[in-house]
Image (tube, rainbow, N blue to C red):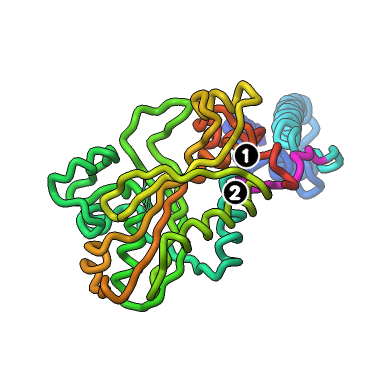
Amino acid sequence: MIDKITEILNNVNNFVFKKENNAASFRLLYLSKKGVITELLNEFKTIPNNEKKLVGAQLNILKQKVEEIYQHQTELEEKTNQSKNKHKDSTLPVYQEGPGSYHPLRIVEDRLLDIFFSLGFDLAEGPEIEDDKHNFSFLNFTKDHPARDMQDTFFIAEHVLRTHTSSVQIREMEKGKLPLRLVMPGRVYRNEAVSARSNCFFHQIEGLYIDKGVSFADLKQTLYYFVQQFFGEGTKVRFRSSYFPFTEPSAEMDIWAGLETEENRRLTKGTGWLEVLGCGMVHPNVLDACNINSLEYKGFAFGMGIDRITMLKYGINDIRDLFLNDKRLLFQFSGV
Ligand code: PHE
């Protein structure tokens, strides 16, 4: 029996605890009613009296060792369970972050689009990675046209990151369905130095209306209506003549932001006027490139920057703040 006890003591000392071999299974094996120790105690009763002293002492050593190991392992497992459950107290109150909210750019874009939807414009979208044809050449930028420099372009091999949403005009005109009355929102990219006022990407809404007999007066009236709706009745606007290769005549539209606040003076560079969009009558070359008879059809187009309008509307001073992914910015717009 001594040999048996020595072997078991050996096993006990070498017992490896794992996930499935835990304190409970150790207890079951050695300390339960049907366990090894009970078995040995029963056997102990049957051995001759003169052996009892020696075997009994060995048995006691084994029993103490088993209990010691069991005790130690139980404590260890309790400790790990405690630390696991530390962050799982389901009775703690829920940490309230407040309701979700739309990004201010999304809020402004939705409002702008709604105004044009109410005038009968439909939605269209195009890809951000464009080819030269849609971003430039069909828009009447010839290969060495100096106006290509107006928009510092990111190139990706044979392609470009679109520098304006005017590329979507071409994609829609190419489809060959007329008349067209569309608003086309999206992100555009320019290789410009990043600062508080300009970013290497921003957002535009392009507008396009092509039909028989569309005039510059229609363009002005549409934009005038838009400004009154968005910026409020009585907002002053002015048109300045301008140049874009794809429109003729071309104009830029400013709204009167005023000179009252420091911020308005800064945003308008001390003039009080804020440029919000470029526009004009679609150039006949553009219509012809897209197989639209420029003698029969006329059109107007405009493109506005959403970021600048958003900054003006909400008094955001730095365009980069819009893209920090800082939840504190978003919380200011919950419920807007
Ligand atoms: N695409 C021009 C720009 O990004 C804006 C524009 C659009 C001008 C449509 C005229 C007509 O600056």
User: Based on the displayed image, in which of its 4 quarters is residue 72 positioned?
Assistant: top right
Q: Which residue is mark 2?
A: 108
**Residue 229, x across and y down, in percent:** 64, 54
How crowded pointer 1 is (Cα within 10 Å; few <14, some 14-19, many 20+) is rated as few
Give the residues drawn in magenta, as a range. 94-103
How crowded pointer 2 is (Cα within 10 Å; few <14, some 14-19, many 20+) is rated as many
Q: For the residue marked with disc 2, what is the amino acid?
A: Val
Q: Quadrant of the N terminus?
A: top right
**Residue 96, x across and y down, in percent:** 79, 39
**Residue 151, x across and y down, in percent:** 29, 40
- Residues at discs 2 and 1 in contact (Cβ within 8 Å): yes
In the image, residue 189 sits, relative to residue 219, either above or below, namely above
Of residues 34 and 211, the one nearer the viewer is 211
- Mark 2 secondary-structure assignment: helix
Of residues 270 and 72, the one nearer the viewer is 270
Q: Which residue is mark 1?
A: 313
Q: Is mark 2 within 8 Å of ligand 1?
A: no
- Tell me: 34 left or right of 17: right
**CA separation, marks 2 and 1?**
9 Å
The residue sitting at the top extreme is 262
